Image: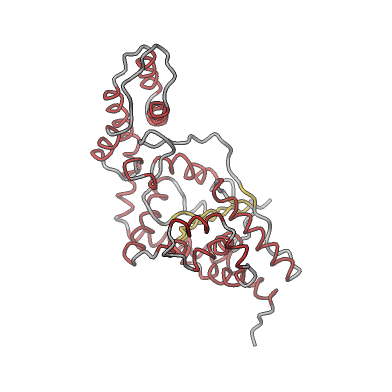
Amino acid sequence: MSKETVVSGIRSTGNLHLGNYFGAIKNFIKMQHEYNCYFFIADYHSLTTHPNPADLHATVKQVLVEYLACGIDPDACTIYIQSDLPETAELFLLLGMNAYVGELERSTTFKEKVRKHPDNVNAGLLTYPVLMAADILIHRASKVPVGKDQEQHLEFTRTFGNRFNRMYKHDLFPEAVAFNYGTSLVKIPGLDGGGKMGKSEGEGNAVFLSDSPEVIRKKVMRAVSDSGPTIENQPKPEAIQNLFTLMEVVSSKETLLHFEDLYNTMKIRYGDMKKQLAEDMILFTAPLREKILALSADDKYIHKVASQGAEKARESASKTISEARKLIGFRSF
């Protein structure tokens, strides 16, 4: 029995942080051995913000390196760079011919971008759902790991795929459904006292996998805390609970229990806790950081991975495009 196909995009900007590692990456590592997985670095999508050529190339390489360092296996899955697959751009064109301005303008993401960046309302932002649909449909995926903020885009994908199937009277594209491994993965809080870890919340909110020990110590020591509990066994405020949650994922059980006891008996010193948390984070990220540095210097291997990924992705994508062209009526003379 053949494995179901899973497709997921990877943002082409920004270094990976602990939140990424315990979230999407942990899922990807498990998926790659259980499904037919295609993970692509979405550099086409980044063009809506007009990155300069040097930044675009450097960030794509960094993202590829960090995913490989975390455990994505190019022999167990297909990891490729979006712009290395021209079939995606062709399917984007074909789907776009039957995507309507009115429905695209109702995209929540588009309306938000227009509100936040009124001076950069480009066509790429409007047609973002079409390109995202092409990314998924090019491999005829049945499952897509998405968060709540991407569910509307997945609905667009089903709309465009079903519309194509009806127009050309052929079930070429399956209906992709949202997919995850449930709620068992730890949600990593940021260092700013509230919410999740993420670069969009500010550089100081996240601990990146490539951060040096010195940088990690500075970030953790600046993490939000308070003056301490005033009664024994006092419920923890959000900012303090965040520190304990971070300790839970990077420290030993004994260390966590030690600081839990100090908190419950009103003896805790947050400076001591942060120092311990920083050292445990450094110890946890050290193997990943070493792999990142080694892979970053190995251009030959990175080229091999990218080329192999493009070849494997093209094998799948070319079949889809060939069938789509025939159904539409394109023929060679």
Q: Is residue 117 left or right of residue 32?
A: left
Residue 137, image x and y in percent?
61, 61
Please indicate whether residue 133 sits to the left or right of residue 294 in the image: right
In the rendered image, the vertical position of residue 295 relative to residue 52, given as above or below: above
Percent from the top left, x then y, of residue 196?
44, 38
| Residue 33 in the image, given as x and y percentages of width and height | 55, 46
Q: Residue at x 38, y 14 (%)?
A: 261
Q: Give the image location of residue 117, x and y in percent.
A: 43, 59
Q: Which of the pair 198/168 is nearer the observer?
A: 198
Position of the C terminus, as image quadrant, is bottom right
- Left or right placement of residue 55 versus residue 235 in this view: left
In front: 147, or 76? Answer: 147
Q: How many marks?
A: 0
Q: Which residue is at the far bottom?
A: 333
**Residue, x 34% and y 13% (percent of image)?**
266
Q: Residue furthest left?
A: 214
| Picture colour scheme | secondary structure
Tell me if residue 54 comes above or below residue 230 in the rendering: below
Q: Which quadrant would residue 62 be assigned to in this image?
A: bottom left
* Residue situated in front as seen by the camera: 286 or 120: 120
- What residue is at 26 percent from the left and 42 percent from the top? 212
Quadrant in which residue 332 is drawn: bottom right
